[in-house]
Image: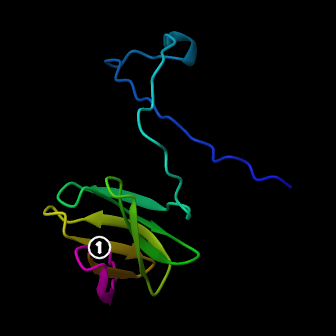
Amino acid sequence: MPSKPPRLLLVVALLACSLPLTAKDIPPFIFDVTSSVTPFPFKIKDAEFSSSLNAIVAVSESPNQLHIYRPDTNELVSVNLQVPPFCVSVSPDGHSAVVGHNGWISHVDLDSATALMSHAATCVS
């Protein structure tokens, strides 16, 4: 069976000053993609961007990993995580990330692509 090309999704967000819009209200438009599109070899669960590293920081399951992708060099580095991730947050300086899991958080150094530590996390309401 021939493989299908990856499906791409372009999301266009419009702020209409609280006016309700439907798809028929949006005028047609054309855009050009001036660079190549690189599909990731994993399904993104959550992602953020590190401006200081010029990198997309994403987490995925199966395998449980944090991925650092640098679009300018097309370099992808992955860090194994102990448990499935739910979310990721990049630090304000862009050099580390925290990954949220079910009852755990992990701290990752993005410069060295190293998982530093994991901590149990509890929440009392």
Foreground: 68 or 123?
68
Element type at marker 1?
strand
Task: Based on the picture, tell me whether residue 112 belongs to the magenta stretch.
Answer: yes
Q: Hey, which quadrant is residue 49 in on the image?
A: bottom left
User: Where residue 91 sits: x, y (%)?
Assistant: 19, 66
Q: Hey, which quadrant is residue 7 in on the image?
A: top right
x 45%, y 32%: residue: 33
Q: Amino acid at mark 1?
A: Val
For this orientation, the residue located farthest to the left is 93
Task: Based on the picture, tell me whether residue 25 belongs to the magenta stretch.
Answer: no
How many other residues sit within 10 Å of disc 1, few (<14), some (14-19) or many (≥20)? some
x 26%, y 73%: residue: 110
User: Where residue 123 sits: x, y (%)?
Assistant: 33, 78
Q: How many marks?
A: 1
Q: Is residue 75 above or below residue 121?
A: above
Foreground: 120 or 36?
36
